[in-house]
Image (cartoon, grey):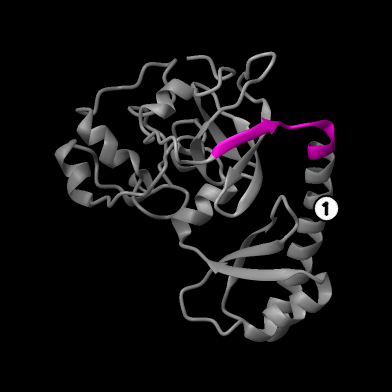
Amino acid sequence: MSAGVPGAFVAVKAIPGGWIRTVLACAAEPPLADGDLVVVQTDSGPALASVVARPLVILNHHPLSEQGPRMLRRASGQDQALRARHELREREAFRLCVMKIRERGLAMKLARVEQLFDGSRLVFSFTSEERVDFRELVRELASEFKTRIELRQIGVRDEARLLSGYGTCGRPLCCSSWLKSFEPVSIKMAKQQDLALNPSRLSGLCGRLKCCLRYELNHGGAPARRDEPYPGSSGDGA
């Protein structure tokens, strides 16, 4: 079904990078194409997203629901200008937060700052190997930016998804291009595929075992077709 037909589903990726979801599309003229910017309604409010390549492949791996997120409209020039202003604020918030983290000697690594599309809050995503008391940091950031502040601790796999990059296969990371959730991966999966147990070859950019060890096991380890960048590829899952 065309993405421009009411009732059709289309796969979209959040801007800035992060989640990939299937959304119920609204009528669009001309029909939506790969890379088109749209505004979607999520549980956190409206968000800017781009239509992703090969949506049918992703749709096959994402559950569809009429009650799920919906596309509100094709993004206008005003929407894109608003996103540009948000990017400036995110860069400034990132710089200031890193400075305050260093001043306080907090054992945390800031991964990304996101200004929600509706301007309701700034979300600071960070990684840490221990519990961090960031209450004073939140108060300082709220005083500086005059908005609601949310500090969100994430894992190293989530960090790789947010920052994106390229795997040893030369393709964009699976977790940032099509993979919806992280499934457990074990070294046993590499053994069952007769792979050399070399940590540097089996680990993704996140330092954890590659997600493709799991789904390539289910596909018999068959090599991917060059025109198929989704399940069955040999990309780093995270």
Q: Is residue 101 left or right of residue 92?
A: left
Give the quadrant of residue 32: top right
Q: Is residue 216 left or right of residue 236?
A: left
- Residue depicted at x 55% and y 52%: 43
Q: Relative to residue 238, is residue 111 depicted above or below?
A: below
- Residue depicted at x 60% and y 34%: 71
Q: Is residue 216 left or right of residue 175?
A: left
Give yes or no for residue 30 being in the magenta stretch. Answer: no
Amino acid of disc 1: Leu
How far across and down, in percent of the image, does residue 41 sit?
A: 60, 43
Q: Relative to residue 222, is residue 102 depicted above or below?
A: below
Residue that numbered label 1 is attached to: 88
Q: Considering the numbered disc 1 on the image, is that residue within a helix, a strand or a loop?
A: helix
- Residue depicted at x 42% and y 47%: 204
How far across and down, in percent of the image, does residue 225 sit?
A: 37, 16
Give yes or no for residue 76 being in the magenta stretch. Answer: yes
Q: Which residues are magenta?
A: 70-79
Which residue extends farthest left? 192
